[in-house]
Image (cartoon, helix red, strand yellow):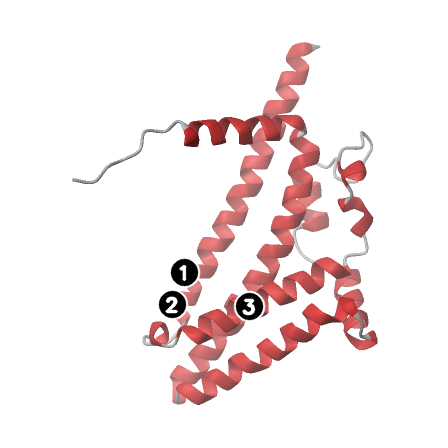
Amino acid sequence: MESSGIGMILWGGAEAALAILLALGMLRLASVFYGALAPADAEAVPLLHVLALAAGLACGLALLLAVPHAESFRISRIFAPDGPWHLGLPGFLARHGLPDAATLQAAWAQLREGGLGALPGGLALLLLAAGPLAALRWWRGGARLRALGAFLLLAASTALLLHYAIHLLAWMLALLNFWLFALLLFAFQRWRHAPTRTGH
């Protein structure tokens, strides 16, 4: 019985590690594609990068505020034995890997109805409009199209990664339970007692 419990913990840890690697892989791919797509002098205009990140964060927040399963993020639901987060990795990716149609519809409805929930969506729209204007202002010809494509790519990947990361955190809390806190405490202790490097 005890070996079965340890096996389940190890399996859950392996699934969590794979889910984290997927997030890091998506982050790396987004960075590579942005670097390949952006104009060669894009680093000289950091505002494009900043606008894309800000638009992505605002859009991701708007999506998170619109999820139909918002109550599942309550601590009592996360740690409930029969809670909504008790899924294997394939089930988690299928249900929460990307925003579903209901989330997109709810985000659009919030934007149309106004109120507090519409603030991040409205900000996202403003930033998504500012990015193309910046591309039109600072680049010409093919470089303009590349700047626009890089902006949209970075904004979209940032929004999707934020959506994924928050769902991943809730899923990992349910999957690893108190073992996650133990791992974080262990990592903190290792960091705190690590020998400091002194330059010469």
Q: Residue at x 49, y 75 (%)?
A: 149
Name the residue beneath numbered marker 1: 32
Q: How busy is the neighbourhood of tag 2: few (under 14 within 10 Å), some, or many (20 plus)?
A: few
Residue bearing the label numbered 2 = 36
Q: Is residue 52 visible?
A: yes
Where residue 128 sits: x, y (%)? 59, 77
Identify the element where label 2 is drawn: helix
Spot occupied by residue 33 in the image (x, y as percentages of width and height):
43, 64
The residue under label 1 is which amino acid type? Val
Q: Tell me whether circle 2 and circle 1 mark residues in contact (CB < 8 Å).
A: yes
Q: How many marks?
A: 3
Give x and y (percent) for residue 200. Answer: 16, 40
Distance of label 2 from label 3 (alpha carbons): 21 Å
Q: Position of residue 165 (x, y in %)?
A: 61, 49
Q: Is residue 171 above or below residue 57?
A: above
User: Relative to 86, is 114 above or below?
Assistant: below
Answer with the quarter of the image where residue 121 lies.
bottom right
Name the residue carrying label 3: 54
Q: Is residue 100 visible?
A: no
Query: Which of the two labelled residues, at mark 3 and mark 1, occupies the earlier sequence position?
Result: 1
Q: Mark 2 to mark 1: distance in Å?
A: 6 Å
Question: Closest to the observer: 52 or 187?
Answer: 187
Direction from residue 53 to residue 3 in the image, left or right: right
- Front-most of residues 62 and 29: 62
